[in-house]
Amino acid sequence: MTKRRQQIREPDITFRRLGKDRPTHRSGCKTPFGVCWKGTGRIHIDPRQSEEELLDTLVHELVHDVQPFLDEDAVDNIGIYISKALWKQGYRRIR
Ligand SMILES: [Zn+2]
C-alpha cells in the first residue's frame, strides 16, 4: 500500500462541553458526544466521556468528515469497528 500522507489535510479537533449535561446513551439525552461539520475537517467533542467512548466518538466524527454522504448507521458501524480495534491494540490519548 502506498500513502499520500502530505496530500491529506489535518482535522481541526476541539474538546469542549457541547451541552449542559454530559452526553449519555440514554434516550432523551440532548447533549451530543461530538459534532462534525462534514467535509470541513472541523470537529468538536464533549470531553465528559470515558477514554474508550472518546476514541469511538473521535473516529465516528472523522468518518462523518471524510464520508459526508454515509448514513448514520454506516458511520456508526465503521466508527465502532475501527475504535474497538484501536482500543484493543492499546491506542490511548497522551496528555
Ligand atoms: Zn453521527
Image (tube, grey):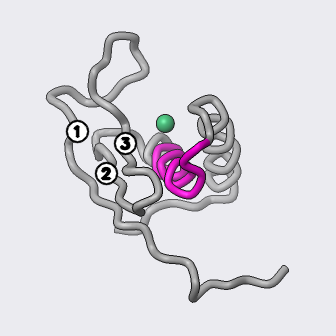
The amino acid pointed to by label 1 is Leu
Q: What is the quadrant of the N terminus in the image?
A: bottom right
For the residues marked 2 and 3, what is the alpha-carbon distance in whole angstroms?
6 Å
Q: For this rendering, which residue is in front, 29 or 70? A: 70
Q: What is the quadrant of the C terminus in the image?
A: bottom left
Callout 1 crowding tier (Cα within 10 Å): few <14, some 14–19, many ≥20: some
Q: Residue at x 39, y 11 (%)?
A: 27
Q: Is residue 65 above or below residue 48?
A: below
Q: Is residue 64 magenta?
A: yes
Percent position of residue 79, x then y: 61, 44
For the residues marked 1 and 2, what is the alpha-carbon distance in whole angstroms?
8 Å
Secondary structure mainly formed by the magenta segment: helix
The amino acid pointed to by label 2 is His
User: For residue 72, which quarter of the picture?
Assistant: top right
Report the residue marked by disc 2.
44
Element marked by disc 1: loop
Percent position of residue 84, x then y: 66, 45
Q: Is residue 81 magenta?
A: no
Q: For this rendering, which residue is in front, 41 or 34? A: 41
Percent position of residue 19, x then y: 19, 32
Mark 3 Cβ inside 8 Å of ligand 1: yes
Q: Residue at x 20, y 26 (%)?
A: 21
The amino acid pointed to by label 3 is Gly
Report the residue marked by disc 1.
18
